[in-house]
Image (tube, rainbow, N blue to C red):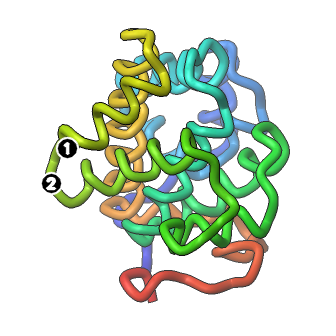
Amino acid sequence: MKQRLELVPVEEARRLGAEMGIGEAQASRSAFRMLAHHPDLLRHVFGLLKMLATRNKLPSRLRELMIMRIGWTTGSDYEWFQHYRIAKAEAGLTDAELVAVRDWRSSELFSEADRAVLAAVDDTRERGEISNAVWAQCEQLFKEPAVLVEMVVMIGNWMLFSQLLKTLRVPIEEDAKPWPPDGKAPAAAA
């Protein structure tokens, strides 16, 4: 599908990125270039993203599992593609684990903490909130209120991004193959 708005030219996006302390590579990405239509919003959005990615209290592995589950269940090829690389390089997830996120309940690859955050994502997508049973499990595992609040914000943030990416039809960067590692997309995205 064709994107709904043209991307801001890469030179302009890089200029804005430099003003915000964001490197050329990230400022050149399609999502940044789409959000660059609204520079003030872009500053705030990337401030939140930076905090959630660099000063997070919840382990990066759990964050990336949540994002990959959101990308899969919403059919967000851009979210899946971008975070596939991050999940492997920064969070140490394997291809087998990332493919298993698609049907995590039937996989034996995930720890109790992994399963808790994946269940929190599914509850939020299906019910609009985390159920009492899943919340109790997360509370028992993570204990610290700041971690629990961060988990909820992370789920909401990347659900927002999925909706934004899909609605604006933000394209994956040129020559990239969607749905790594196997090219299989969810039925909703096909």
Task: Work out whether residue 79 or residue 101 is closer to the camera in this orientation and state it.
Answer: 101
Vertical relation: 76 (above or below) 45 = below
Assess whether mark 2 and mark 1 are in contact (beta carbons under 8 angstroms).
Answer: yes
Task: Work out whether residue 129 or residue 173 is closer to the camera in this orientation and state it.
Answer: 129
Question: Horizontally, is 123 left or right of 27 in the view?
Answer: left
Specify the label residue 139 is tagged with: none
Q: Please tell me in which quadrant of the rendered image residue 140 appears.
A: top left
Specify the label residue 127 is tagged with: 2
Q: Please tell me in which quadrant of the rendered image residue 25 appears.
A: top right
Report x, y in % for residue 182: 74, 82
Specify the label residue 131 is tagged with: 1
Amino acid type at mark 1: Ser
For label 2, the SS is helix
Mark 1 to mark 2 CA distance (whole Å): 8 Å
Within 10 Å of the Cα at label 2, are there few (<14), some (14-19), or many (20+) other Cα atoms? Answer: few
Task: Work out whether residue 75 or residue 103 is closer to the camera in this orientation and state it.
Answer: 103
For label 1, the SS is loop
Number of callouts in the render? 2
Q: Nearer the viewer, mark 1 or mark 2?
A: 1
Report x, y in % for residue 53: 62, 25
Q: Residue at horizontal 41%, vertical 88%?
A: 187
Q: Residue at horizontal 26%, vertical 56%?
A: 125
Vertical relation: 75 (above or below) 60 = below
